[in-house]
Amino acid sequence: MGFQKVLSCALSHDLSASVKQAHHNAIRTLLALSLLSQHTQRLHGAALPRLRYHAALNWDKWTPLVKSYAAYAIGAALVDTEIQVSDEELVAMNVDKGMMTLVDADRQAEMLAHLSDHLIRASHASGGSAGNSMIATALMGAPTYMSCKVAKDDDGDIYLADLEASGVAHGLSNQRQDGVTGKCLVLITPDAERSLNTNLAISETLSVDEVNESAIRESDWVYLEGYLVTSPTGHAAALKTKALADQHGVLTAVSFSDPGMVKFFRDNMEAMVEGGVELVFCNESEALEWGQCDDIEGAIAAIKQVARRFVITLGAEGAITWDGTTLHRTNAQPVKAVNTNGAGDMFAGAFLYALSRGESDLRATEFATLAAGEVVKYFGPRLDRDACLDLRRQFFGD
């Protein structure tokens, strides 16, 4: 008789107080053995269903539960405008290359006026780090949920239309307010580096009110973007989301998002990972900033203090993965990059998708590296549905 059937039979009866603890201990042992078996299968590449076992507080019954979402995310809803510029123009406009800088509407308007003849074909699309990742995961075939804030304006319409077209669930249909939806000017230099100039607008007021406990409880993962550290209310929302995830046994993944988030908002970032998180995504610059060191070994040691697992992306050099036991190095395929906007978001989204299939962290990194390498070939923050499904078929064969 299979484990799930044994478990179901054993727990279908009410237990007397005198034997509850004995049954509880036995069941925990059986469950641990089952999860160990599942982990072994993952290491051999087996695709397993996203199955969780939920225990009632009185331990009377355990119920097999398939979660509604592979991942839940909360973050800023932004509409991107991508602009090709030269390095000289970045200097002339006093833009920090490769960084995310918060600007107001007047500063954005000034930059747009100066660069109006530079608009490229993929100039207007929904963006935002967490949103890009949730869309990627959904387009690959795993359901996701996004909590954010958009206004009753044209950009808000664009953002919601993209979420819905991608199959990302949200609770925004009846919650939009007057105001301005957040915007990001993405300045792309010939070396494919992107420099972000973000006006959060209504996203600056993202708060605990947007946190959806029901959706968190129904998710395998919670995904927090590091950009939330810049807003007091957004940071509070991130902390509440993590607390609810911990309460409901949901795994938490945090993206450091940008070196500036780690450097200038370190206290808030430390609070976001306080007590430890299951998974951290970061690039090499963010990792070194977190470790406050200039060698990757020091950065790895520092991240191990706050994350049970992590991935450090290395751009064209691939990625480093710590799966909780072993450090892996994954090489990237050579590509001609024209735009790195969205590469990290695509990596995280593809990684979470692979985990939803029951893949190992190493396999997830290999797939995410492939996906990130694909998105940098084009303008725009992500791939379309057909491209995502092509990647899935190419890597997983289905």
Image (cartoon, helix red, strand yellow):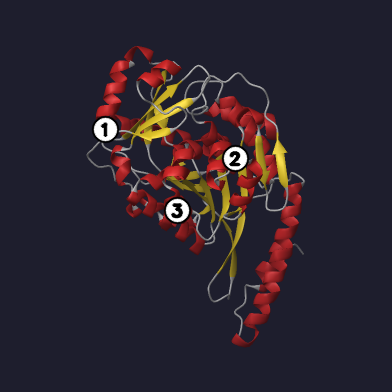
Amino acid at circle 2: Asp
Q: Earlier in the sequence, mark 1 or mark 2?
A: 1
Q: Residues within 10 Å of mark 2 (few under 14, many from 20)?
A: few
Pick the quarter of the image with the C terminus.
Answer: top right
Across and down, in percent, residue 254 comes to 51, 48
The residue furthest top is 117
C-alpha gap between disc 1 and disc 3: 26 Å
Q: Which residue is mark 3?
A: 215
Which residue is depicted at the point 49% across and 39% down?
Answer: 259
Q: Earlier in the sequence, mark 2 or mark 3?
A: 3
Marks 2 and 3 close (CB-CB < 8 Å): no
Helix, strand or loop status at disc 1: loop
Helix, strand or loop status at disc 3: helix
Name the side, left or right, on which 218 lies relative to 104.
right
Query: Could you tell me if residue 85 is visible in this image?
Result: no
> So how many labels did they put on this image?
3
**Which mark, residue 153?**
1
Pick the quarter of the image with the N terminus.
Answer: bottom right
Q: Which residue is mark 2?
A: 294
Amino acid at circle 3: Ala
| Quarter of the rendering containing residue 64 | bottom right
C-alpha gap between disc 2 and disc 3: 40 Å
C-alpha gap between disc 1 and disc 2: 45 Å
